[in-house]
Image: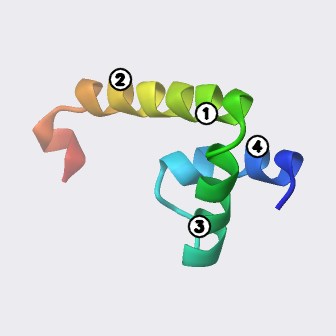
Amino acid sequence: MDHDEAAQLLGAFALRALEDDENAQVIAHLESCAWCQVEATRYERVLSILRDTVEPDDAA
């Protein structure tokens, strides 16, 4: 998987929505790409904020 392919999958990676093989490839890419590491962290922060804004009744 090249950088552009991995970068396009970071949102789905953060959502845990990738197939096992794609997930493994993104993880392997993240080990050597500082840019994607930063972007993955940004996605995780946004998801954390969104999770914190959902009230328990909204999650049902």
**Real-space Cα separation, disc 3 to disc 2, in angstroms:** 26 Å
In the rendered image, residue 18, in percent from the top left (x then y), is placed at 58, 66
Above or below for 21 versus 55: below
- The amino acid type, in three-letter code, at marker 1 is Gln
**Real-space Cα separation, disc 4 to disc 1, in angstroms:** 10 Å
Label 3 vs 4, first from the N-terminus: 4
Residue 34 placement, left or right of 4: left
Query: Would you call the spot at circle 4 few (<14 residues within 10 Å), some (14-19), or many (20 or more)?
Result: many
**Residue denoted by label 1:** 37
SS of the residue under disc 2: helix
- The amino acid type, in three-letter code, at marker 2 is Ile
Label 3 vs 2, first from the N-terminus: 3
**Residue denoted by label 4:** 7
- CB-based contact (under 8 Å), mark 3 and mark 2: no
**Residue denoted by label 2:** 49
Name the outermost residue toward the front: 32
SS of the residue under disc 4: helix
- The amino acid type, in three-letter code, at marker 3 is Ala
